[in-house]
Amino acid sequence: MYKKYHFIAFALILIAISAIANLTFVFMSVLIVVWFSIVAITKVLHFDKKLSDQEKNLYKITIILYPLFETIIKYLLLHDIIAQSWFWINRFEHFLSAIAIEILLYPLLKPTLKKLSLTESLIFSICTITFVGNLNEFLEYFIRHLLGTYRLNFFYWDTIYDMVMNIFGAIFGFLILLRQKHRRMLNTKLFLV
């Protein structure tokens, strides 16, 4: 469906949009480079070939749409487009970010998840996504304090809210992936170890 280097071109377009839109260019550029690096690793190591057709479609949609979503959200937050709504937009951002990260990492985590029970898989997924979310929060903190700038990081004080939304997003992302693979198991084995 997409050629070998299309994701690189797409990443460069998103970086250009970020710069033009006067977004937090450095922070968004880092996120986009990391995002598409994980996509490249998945492609090069052929982890995406182990996905079912439904999982591949969900993965492809996510790797394309999430960076666009994140760019739009950052623009809304920076320019206060919806007045006084940053708190709820930021909560929504972290919820959907956790879902997107779960789907992004799924091809890499699938071999491990297949060896675990459903409950163990849920716990493993929540821990993994929460860990990634915590790394993001530490990055925001260090950007603010090491670089001494408020422009690159606007809401680091709301870390606990962000972490809670990461947990909810990880659970919801797990359920989305579970539905893709094991629809009938959802009702019978969700809490069996």
Image: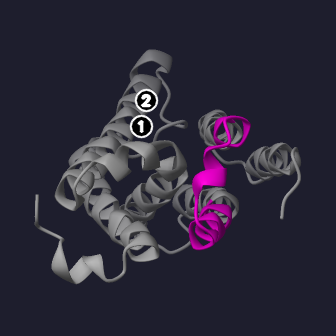
Q: Residue at x 61, y 35 (%)?
A: 34
User: Which of the two residues, 162 or 180, is positioned nearer the viewer here?
Assistant: 180
Residue 147 shows up from this direction: yes
- Report x, y in % for residue 159: 27, 44
**Label 2: which residue?**
139
Is residue 76 placed above or below 25 in the rendered structure? below
Q: Decide if residue 15 is on the left or right side of residue 182.
A: right
In the shown orientation, is residue 65 left or right of residue 188?
A: right
Q: Main secondary structure of the magenta part?
A: helix
Q: Could you say which disc has been placed on residue 89 in the image?
A: none
Instruction: Work out how far the residue at label 1 is from the one at label 2, CA to CA, in angstroms.
Output: 5 Å
Q: Position of residue 68 (x, y in %)?
A: 68, 61
Quadrant placement of the N terminus: bottom right
Q: Secondary structure at mark 2?
A: helix
Compared to residue 34, the image places residue 56 above or below, namely below
Looking at the picture, which amino acid does disc 1 mark?
Asn
* Front one among 75 and 108: 108
Q: Which residue is mark 1?
A: 136
Labelled pair 1, 2 in contact (Cβ < 8 Å)? yes
Work out which quarter of the rendered image holds the C terminus and state it: bottom left
Residue in the image at 31% along x and 47% along y: 115
The crowd level at tag 2 (other Cα within 10 Å; few <14, some 14-19, many 20+) is: some
Q: Residue extending furthest front?
A: 115
Q: Which residues are magenta?
A: 41-62
Residue 130: x percent and y percent?
Answer: 30, 45
Q: Position of residue 191 (x, y in %)?
A: 11, 67
**Foreground residue among 120 and 74:** 120
Q: In the rendered view, would you say 28 is above or below 142?
A: below
Check disc 1 and report its element: helix, strand or loop: helix
Q: Is residue 141 magenta?
A: no
**What type is the residue that disc 2 sits on?**
Leu
Regarding residue 158, the answer to whether it shows in the image is no
